Amino acid sequence: MRSLISIMDFSVDELDDLIHTAMDIIDRPHEYSQKCRGKKLATLFFEPSTRTRLSFEAAMYELGGNVIGFSEAGSSSAAKGESVADTAKVISCYADIIAMRHPMEGAPLVASDNATIPVINAGDGGHNHPTQTLADLLTIYREKGRLGNLTIGLCGDLKYGRTVHSLIEAMSRYEGIKIVLISPDELRLPGYVKKEILDRHHIPFEEISSLEEAMSKLDILYMTRIQRERFSNMEEYKRLKDSYILTPEKLKSAKEDMCILHPLPRVNEISVAVDKDPRACYFKQALNGKYMRMALILKLLEDAACSPVRKTRDMQTVKNLRCQNPRCITSAEQELEHIFKRTDEGICRCIYCEKKAE
Ligand code: NCD
């Protein structure tokens, strides 16, 4: 049985297969309208969401299935102190597949370690958001006709923007990718993404703070929101929140076929006047998210039917260390065992949040 916790859980071939399934769903929706008849998706959302939760729900309904779940932690037993592990065990009795969003990094991995059904990470704190990446990949494929040989600019909150981390992981496995990281100094990409992903895959990248400087060379511009809810210091958020505002004026130096993406919600980092520009693809991206989630649900339910046993961890682990990251699920749930993986460079990283052992 497979889950999707990190986009790296899927090979490039599997990602390509999902894209092909999604394209077929777009062409022949009726062929898919009963594929999940009698199946239930549980949407366990401990954090706010519009697109992710509702596109998961729409996806399951369009496959002929049903949906149960909750959309805020306060209406679940988490409010009474129930652990993620216990929640996952219980929901496994009621549903066939789980989509979970949680503010603590690594919570969906804990769920998949304890559930007897597939678990999909629908966003864990500032860590990962692999299903947004599926939406991003289908959009890039449909707009550009390819997933390789692209210069991608990622702009905004690269520190806490989980969609950026997952997208970089996915793109690093295609040929001819160049990355331009555009952020204020305070919101640069975390070290583990630079080391474990960009350096390891020999992806050329630069870190700059000026969007104007990067504009003319980009094939894709991926804008992101400054993630207010992740800041411990609101003064810092206020200082950084308007770091980048994309306007028609700024787009004058961009390629004519550049593709503008944004996972949404937008706050004010893309002016509404940009929406009319044919390069603006963020609303198409939200629609593509539904098709990719349909393809994903189908794949994971088919895998679960063929091999109902949970995959065991195939990495070398170290257990006598403690994760110090306050945003990691291990800091919220005292009984959870701290487990680290050893990277090829010999660094120990928490399996839940990927922060280095100190
Ligand atoms: C993103 C998220 O939740 O990380 N939204 C989404 O799922 N489309 C981006 C964001 O909240 O800024």
Image (cartoon, grey):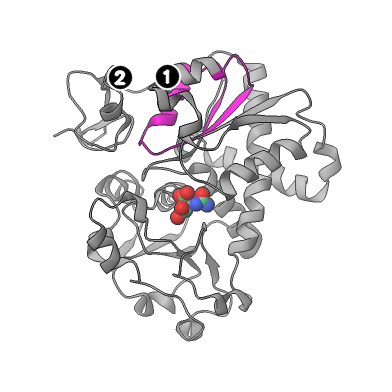
| Residue 28 x %, y % | 83, 46
Q: With respect to residue 348, does 259 lie above or below? A: below
Q: Is residue 301 magenta?
A: no
| Residue 2 visible, this orientation | yes
State the residue position of label 1. 85
State the residue position of label 2. 336
Q: Amino acid at mark 2?
A: Leu
Q: Which span of residues is magenta-colored?
A: 91-120
Q: Amino acid at mark 1?
A: Ala
Earlier-in-chain disc, 1 versus 2? 1
Q: Nearer the viewer, residue 91 or 324?
A: 91
Number of numbered discs on residues = 2
Name the image quarter holding residue 214: bottom left
Pointer 2 local density, CA inside 10 Å: few below 14, some 14–19, many at least 20: some
- Residue shown at 29% from the left, 71% from the top: 209
| Residue 273 x %, y % | 56, 79
Task: Decide if residue 236 is on the left or right side of residue 257.
Answer: left
Q: Nearer the viewer, residue 56 or 346?
A: 56
Q: Nearer the viewer, residue 290 or 74?
A: 74
